[in-house]
Amino acid sequence: MSKLLRVNTRKKTFLFEEPGNSISSLGGRGLTSRMILDEVPADCHPLSRDNKIVIAPGILTGTPAANSSRLSVGSKSPLTGGIKESNSGGLVSYKLARLGIKAIVLEDKPEDDAWSMIIIKKNSVEILPADEYIGKGTNEMVEKMWAKYGDKVGVMCIGAAGEQRLSAASIQLADPHGRPGRAIGRGGLGAVMGSKKIKVIIVDDKGAEKVEMADKEAFKAASKAWAKMLADHPVTGQGLPGFGTAILVNIINEAGALPTKNFRSGRFEHAKDISGEKMVELIKERGGVVSEGCCPGCVIKCSQSYNDKDGNYLTSGFEYETIWAAGAHTMIKDMDDIAMLDRICDDVGVDTIDCCVALGIAMEGGVIEWGDGKAAIELLKKVGTDDPMGRIIGNGAHFTGQALGVDRVPTCKKQALPAYDPRAVKGVGVTYATTPMGADHTAGYGVTANILSVGGTVDPFEKPGNIDLSKNLQIATAAVDSAGFCLFVAFAVLDTENALQLIADMVNGRYGTRITPDDIIELGKSVLKSEYEFNEKAGFTKVDDQLPAFFKEQFPPHNVTWDYSIDELQEAKNF
């Protein structure tokens, strides 16, 4: 039986406890959202002692199931003011599951300025002083932790932005190669970890046994079919391994949906210079790595190692969203400048989407010029320092817009919109508006049917079908997040008739249960209902489920608009 590890950050104490019946079968996002609803007052300040962080592996994490090692982190968000689950790869989730830890819960808040670190091993938990590490970037933190505690230990840490409790602060996780390129990025959860005065958590699973299987043969058969499904699908088996998520730059640009110059146009004339194809060309020229996994058991391997002009490592996990936010959104066309912005975000510990969108808002406000990559780098370097502009950018796009008096700020529930314009990809636009997470493409990736013809086809420019598309994807995604799967398995799942049955078979083989595909869908619905309930208690209403008014403008090249009413959008939440 997996146990909860509760850490009181004020008393510097911990205890293990059995999970109650209401959460005993949950994992990942299902567990984090339920515990936040049950244990965190919805009206509390996100940085107060009443807020908590719940760090949870998925239901299938720790097993050999392909791409099942994602980590969910839940809390009340300092950025949105609502419930938040952000997830990432790295090593921590897999190792927690092998140690039989269902979740880590960080509670309370220190009354002094002393910082701590948590070291979790097979038979011990230590809470030690960490003041010596304050001010250090995440690259140095991972290097020091691996040197001190051994290669391959799981590391999750905050940078200077989390220490300063900035609203866009991330929690960075070490990947299997010892680089902090995996982020619990969205929603400012690094600020909550900073409020608890926890600089770093180490997880060492040395000596742990393999997770127990109720039916090894049944699990093995389903797991084998699952891995083959991922390997055989053109997106998960070819596109993502070949070019990473940046393969989408040319695709979305060609579709006229790549938000350019702060969502003014759907095409960027220099898209080829920041494309996945260009990225791979540079990686090969400079001796980097085109395709690698970000967590144990990954068969998709869409991550990579990007080197600078001199062949020295610069960044990893170089994602489409980051390349867009630091590229087309800001009009920056130099891939090396974009890669440096990615590295700085990871090292200081901020969400690349919110902070690079904030750079575009700074350009909108006249602080720096559009397309000036070097100026953007110097501005981003101020984050984590005492410079007022660093504090502004580090609090994300919404705050930056307020500070600079800018009225064109692409956010929903104060969270920056990602890399698909909602007018030209209406399915994902509905998700931006209605997900309890704030604008978040991963909550219901309507790009699948709108652009990629995965799981069917729905016209991205017209309203019919897109509310149902978003609704169904939000439900499915909540279940995928709960299982511990990478979101990208969804491409193959949507195109494979028995995919949900395979998931059910793996869960049944692992636990000896008898769940069905219908139970998986019901799980997704229950997760969303918990999140809706928390946000309602926090003061959110249907008025918050809408995009900024400037999206009513016609959007070239297709001259489409955002034309959903608030009441129409509520249908995405009715199930």
Image: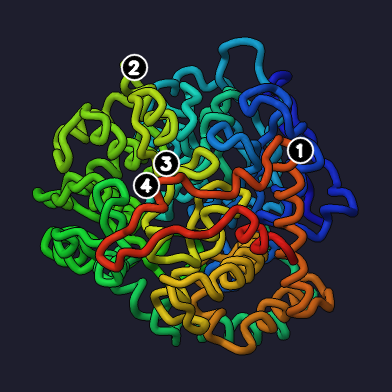
Which quadrant does the N terminus fall into? bottom right
Residue 183 or 187: which is nearer the viewer? 187
Q: Is residue 100 toward the left or the right of residue 493 in the image?
A: right
In the rendered image, which quarter is residue 7 located in? top right
Few, some or many residues within 10 Å of mark 2 (<14, 14–19, 20+): few
Counting labels gives 4
Give the residue type that dot 3 points to. Asp
In primary-sequence order, the first of circles 1 and 3 is 3
Numbered disc 1: secondary structure: helix
User: Is the Cβ of the residue at disc 2 closer than 8 Å to that at disc 4?
Assistant: no
Q: Is residue 135 left or right of residue 569?
A: left
Labels 4 and 3 touching (C-beta < 8 A) = no
* Callouts 1 and 4 close, C-beta under 8 Å: no
Camera-side residue of 55 and 533: 533
The disc placed on residue 179 is 4
Which mark, by number, is residue 565?
Answer: none
Position of residue 340 relative to residue 527, above or below, is above
Q: Which mark is residue 351?
A: 3
Above or below — where is 548 with respect to 118?
A: below
Q: CA distance from mark 1 to mark 4?
A: 39 Å
**Residue at image x 70%, y 56%?**
528
Q: What is the distance, in whole Å, between disc 2 and disc 4 at their CAs?
A: 29 Å
Helix, strand or loop status at disc 3:
loop
| Disc number for residue 388 | 2
Who comes first in sequence, dot 4 or dot 3? 4
